[in-house]
Amino acid sequence: NYHHHVISPELHESISQNAKYYSDQLSDIYHSSYSSNSETEISSEKERIFESLNQPAFKSDGKSPKQIMKDNTKFVRSLLAKPIEDPKLLKLVQKEEFKELENATFVSLVRNSELNGIIKTIKQIEETFNDKFHYPYTFLNDQPFTENFKSSILKEIPGSQVHFAEISSSEWDKPSFIDEKLETRGIKELEEVGVGYAGKLSYHNMCRYYSKGFYNHPILKEFKYYWRIEPSTNYFCQIDYDVFKFMKDNNKVYGFVLNLYDSPHSVKSLWNETLRFLKNNTQHINENGAHKWITENLQNPSNFEIAKGYSTCHFWSNFEIGDMDFYRSEAYSSWVEHLDKTGGFYYERWGDAPVHSIGLGLFADKSQIHWFRDIGYEHTPYLNCPNSNKCNTALCPKGKFSRFNGMDSQNCLATWAKYEMTDEQLNNY
Ligand code: GDP
Ligand code: MN
């Protein structure tokens, strides 16, 4: 009765082999849940998934991580080499059939000093997508936007509604329960291992705000879908269908373009704290979640080790198209409240990308997460440059992950594509 749909025989095998793997780090969690009734059959599927999340997803078959990375890089390159167009087998509303806006907005948290960068990006968004649809924009800032910022932006977006919104300090600032000593010690440790932005308070605030704040901002509360944009990012391809309607009609909660590894030291205890939450909240676990992707341990075992059971693979959140009702759900919001109370946004440097990604991997059905292969996108140093005649491939290196050499080891798209996508989804382009 152990071999249910969720756990494949191969995963079951790896679970049995590795059953004691985490007993050091997680003895409290592991033993309090299971030692008292170790003789009893654990009947609930969700309890069983919780147990599997305590383990590495796979047992090594002897292949070295280097070899796995090499094979997976080849696999990703072959996926990206395929000529593509619009998504297939999914509902699309082309610009000619477009009638009315979905409940959606672009969102950008941005500083006054980034005016030129955000204008460059807005021009590309308008040219490739939004001059056909005229979705609204919402700009957020912890400081008041200057008159110059606002008027310069408005000139670029003549056809859309535009909101400029300030973030209240109670939502943005470091909470008062953060212990200064622990914070200073944490920053020092992160700086010693070279974690970027470790000592930059505003960066911690930003990550926390994108993790647990933005979707409840009074302006954004009025919207369901968002498309996050960042200053100085590039968009290379024409998107001729309404992506927000695409999300709705195909029952998607999240769309991403790039999938990569995080600095493992920045999230040292994020997974541990997540397991601590899940232990008492197994009801929130989605039985069709992207669990293998989260606990994948063979392609980058060093990251997996440092992050204590989390692969550190995540959707790169400087681009994201999502349904904010997912974040507003009981599952995501109670989990992220738990995370916040641990202080990890300040004692470590948890990013909003791993937080969104783990939340989605645990609480969403993986079939509701869409890889937008057709959106050509760049945030230095990574990019997606599709092999499509809708893309201006004079501007980007076709099928590559970066303009720089030696970056493929940061790509973990292969683990998403291999373990979480169906064949049908792989044929969506
Ligand atoms: P990186 O991509 O991880 O290097 O981080 P960024 O510096 O690009 O920051 C992520 C996003 O948050 C960007 O859109 C920034 O404009 C924005 N951001 C970061 N820090 C602040 C801040 O202190 N205030 C405001 N208003 N925006 C910020
Ligand atoms: Mn950025």
Image: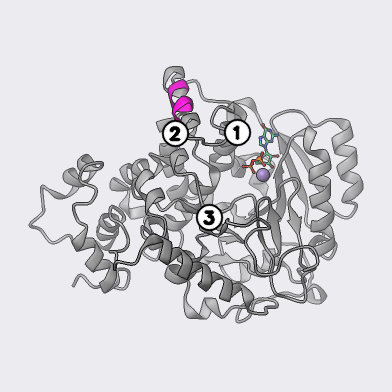
Looking at this view, is 247 or 194 the one in front? 194
Rendered view: 107 above or below 235: above
Q: Which is more N-terminal, label 1 or label 3?
A: 1
Residue 45 in the image: state x and y as whole percent.
26, 63
**Numbered disc in front, either 3 or 1:** 3
How far is the residue under mark 3 from the one under mark 2? 24 Å
Q: Quadrant of the C terminus?
A: bottom right
Looking at this view, is 78 or 390 the one in front? 78
Is disc 3 in contact with disc 2, using a CB cutoff of under 8 Å?
no
How far is the residue under mark 3 from the one under mark 1? 22 Å
Residue marked by disc 3: 410
Specify whether 203 is left or right of 386. Answer: left
Residue at the spot 60% in from the left edge and 81% down from the top edge: 89
Residue marked by disc 1: 203
The range drawn in magenta is 184-189
Residue at the spot 57% in from the left edge and 75% down from the top edge: 79
Residue 179 on the magenta span: no
| Quarter of the image where one finds residue 201 | top right
Amino acid type at image mark 3: Gln
* Disc 1 secondary structure class: helix
Is disc 3 in contact with disc 1, using a CB cutoff of under 8 Å?
no
Residue 377 in the image: state x and y as whole percent.
70, 59
- Looking at the rendered structure, which numbered label has been put on residue 344? 2
Residue at the spot 60% in from the left edge and 36% down from the top edge: 206
Specify whether 127 is left or right of 322. Answer: right
* Disc 3 secondary structure class: helix
- Mark 1 residue CB less than 8 A from any atom of ligand 1: yes
Dividing the image into four equal quarters, which quarter contains ligand 1?
A: top right
How far is the residue under mark 1 from the one under mark 2? 13 Å
Amino acid type at image mark 1: Tyr
